[in-house]
Image (spheres, helix red, strand yellow):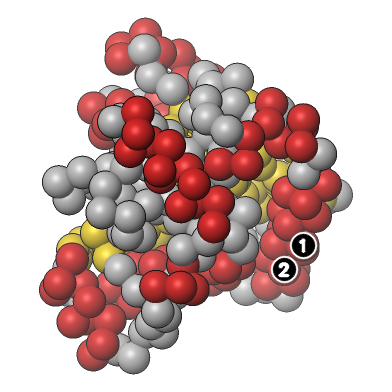
Amino acid sequence: MDKPFSLMIHGGSGTLEHIKREGSEADFTRSLHDILEAGRKILAAGGGALDAVEHCAICLENDPLYNAGRGSVLNEYGEVEMDAAIMDGRDLDAGSVAGITYIKNPIALARCVLDKSEHVMLIGKGAMEFAKLHSITRMEDDYFVVESRIRQWREAQQSGRMMLDHEDAEPQYKLGTIGAVARDQAGNLAAATSTGGIVNKRWGRVGDSPIIGAGVFADNETCAVSATGYGEQFQRTVLSKTISDLIYFKGLSGPEAAKAGIQYLVDKVNGLGGVIVIDQMGRCAVGHSTSGMIYGWIEHGGDTYCKLS
Ligand code: ASP
């Protein structure tokens, strides 16, 4: 028997006042809506959750509104260095890449790691060699680096600090990491997360996004999770897996687990960020400790909703 599908995407969390002030809410809403509709097409036609989250993540990476793929934030050298991961809830198979450059769609490379390698995570130079071997699309620097990111980076350099994409800065500089979670008609769950990381990051810093269990997790028996926020805090609390464990071991629903997970993040490490969650019943949930989060959802094949809250 077919089960209705559900889909959620996010475009990061943080302070969103600037988006409202600038009046760019409509741009985000349009982008989220179009991407959710593209995902709906896949899932309504009986496509798999893994394909749906990969496709939505690719669309989000291609949109310079977000801090992933094109439009990624810049590291201390003024370069784009990206992380991404994808996970299949059917068998806990996963693919992940970190510290990669020039790859148009890091999530497609992560999917290739999942499908075509015996490993889970590839980094830097080796990941780039693997990408070449599998003819993954590369782009030149000027594709990734957009003007607003250069200004944001200069500001971070001047103040000598690293910061979250949505952290307090000039309005136009604040955009976000991306993620997608889905449940397909067969009841399978999948999750994907992709990011440029945090502004002005140093020393090969890798955040939570490509770490299975921290920034991404999917298990058919529990839920699919994609996270955004200060990666270090999500790594230390293994937050995506913690949310799954709250369902697996404590019997919570997805919405309850999302709430309890964010509470845990705050209680344990005073963490800043957010999650999107779809549970095994296809219920959609969001939780964030930041003042805002950019996300949208389709629950049980129903209407499309987009929210900047
Ligand atoms: N979680 C990402 C990281 O720490 C950043 C973000 O979500 O904006 O790399």
Q: In the image, is residue 20 above or below residue 148? A: above
- Choose top left, top right, bottom left or bottom right for residue 140: bottom left
Quadrant location of the N terminus in the rendered image:
bottom right
Report x, y in % for residue 298: 74, 49
Tell me where residue 55 appears, x and y as whole percent.
57, 70
Residue 284: percent from left, percent from top? 65, 39
The local crowd at label 1, few if under 14, some if 14 to 19, many if 20 or more residues have their Cα within 10 Å, is: some
Q: At 50% from the left edge and 65% from the top edge, which residue is drawn?
A: 70
Q: Secondary structure at mark 1?
A: helix
Q: Can residue 187 be seen?
A: no
Residue at horizontal 72 percent and vertical 53 percent from the top: 32
In this orientation, which residue lies closer to the viewer: 159 or 246?
159
Residue 194 position (above or below residue 254): below
Which residue, as the protein is rendered here, is positioned at the far front?
Answer: 158
Q: Position of residue 203 (x, y in %)?
A: 14, 46
Which one is in front, 305 or 158? Answer: 158
User: Quick one: SS at disc 2?
Assistant: helix
Q: What's the residue at 26%, 54% (across, down)?
A: 77
Q: Could you tell me which residue is drawn at 32 percent across and 42 percent down?
A: 200
1 vs 2, front mark: 1
Query: On the rendered structure, is 16 left or right of 100?
Result: right
* Cα–Cα span, label 1 and label 2: 6 Å
Residue assigned mark 2: 38
- Quadrant occupied by the C terminus: top right
In the foreground, 201 or 41: 201
Q: Are marks 1 and 2 in contact (CB under 8 Å)?
A: yes
Which residue was labeled with disc 1?
Answer: 34
Q: Quadrant of residue 141?
A: bottom left
Which amino acid lies under the numbered mark 2 shown in the image of this protein? Ala
| Kind of residue indicated by mark 1 | Asp
Which residue is most to the top? 267
